[in-house]
Amino acid sequence: MKKLVFVPILFSIYLISGQTRQLDKVNLLFEQGNYRIVERKCKKILKKEKAAKQYENQYKIYLQLTSYMLDNELNTQKIIFSTKEIINLLKDDNINTSIDYISLGKFKQKIEKDIIKLKSKQQENSAKELYENYCYFFKLKKLNYEELEKKENEKPEEYISKESSSLVNYAKSYLGIPYLYGGTTKKGFDCSGFTRDVFLNYGYTIPRTAKDQSIFTRKVKVKNIKSGDLLFFGKNDKNISHVGIAIKNKSEELKMIHSSSSNGIIISKVMSNTYWAPKFRFAGRVID
C-alpha cells in the first residue's frame, strides 16, 4: 500500500519539476525576443498539457507580455488591456512566483517609449494610465512621466563588454539544471561548480570553491559592477558560502544567475531580495 501512495506523490513532484523547467525555457525565449515562439508554446501548454494549476497564471502572464511586445501599431486599447491583465494575474492568490523572475528590460523600454508616444499624440489619459501600470511593474515612485523623455535622450551607459555579455548569455543556457552538492557537470551543479564551469568555457580557470573564487578575483565597488562579475555572499567577507554571476543592465536592478540549493540554476534579483541582500558581501571581477 505504501508504494501505491508514494507513486502519485512522485508523479506530482515530477510534474512540478517539469513545469518549472518549461517555464525557465519560456523565460529564456522571452528574454531572447522570441515572442511568437513564446506565444505558441504558452497557448499549447494551456490548451493541451496538464499544467499544474499553480503555474497557469505564469503562462497567462507570458501571453499578455508577448501580446504587448508584438504590438507595433501602438494599439492603445490593446496595450492598456495587456498591462492591466498582467497586474490582475499578479494579484491572484494562485500565482506561484512574482514577475521579478522574468527579465523585463525590453518590456520596460517599450512601455517607456509607448508612454512618450501617447503623450506626443495628446492621448494624456492613456499615457497616464499606462504610466500607472509601469510604476506598478517596476515598483517605482510616481514621478512626473515627462522625466521619461529626458531619459530617452540620455546616452546609454556601457555596462557590458562583448565577452562578458557572451558569457552571461552562455550561462543562461544552464537554466533549469538542478542543484547538486559538489556537482560540477550538467547533471547537477553547486554554486561554485556552476561559475567555474561557465568561466572554463571562455578559457578562464578559476578556483573550485566560492571562498577561493572570492580571494582569486579582483574586488570592484558596487556602483561599478557589470555583467560577468562574480557576486559573493556569506556571514562576512572571510566566510563566503555562495557565489553567482552578475547580470547588470541599465534598465534593471542588479540580478545574478546562480545555482540555488532549492531551485537549481535560476536568475534572482539581489538588492531587493530579502534573502540575498543581507548576505551580499562584495563583487569580484575576472574579465576586464
Image: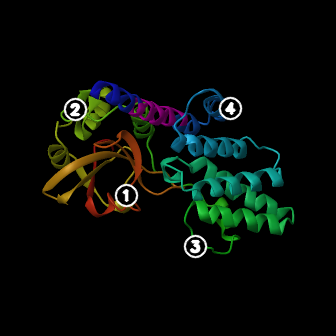
**Mark 4: which amino acid?**
Arg
**Mark 2: which amino acid?**
Thr
Magenta region includes residue 20: yes
The label on residue 205 is: 2
> How far is disc 4 from disc 1 in space, using C-alphas?
36 Å
Q: Do the residues under discs 2 and 4 have CB atoms within 8 angstroms?
A: no
Tell me which numbered mark, 4 or 3, is placed earlier along the sequence: 4
Please state if 115 lies on the left or on the right of 262 as rendered. right
Q: Residue at x 39, y 41 (%)?
A: 266
Q: Point out residue 12 in the picture as x, y percentages from the top left corner.
A: 42, 33
> How far is disc 1 from disc 3 in space, using C-alphas?
25 Å
Residue denoted by label 3: 141
What range of the chain is rendered magenta? 12-26
Q: Secondary structure at mark 3?
A: loop
Q: Main secondary structure of the magenta part?
A: helix
**Mark 3: which amino acid?**
Lys
Residue denoted by label 4: 36
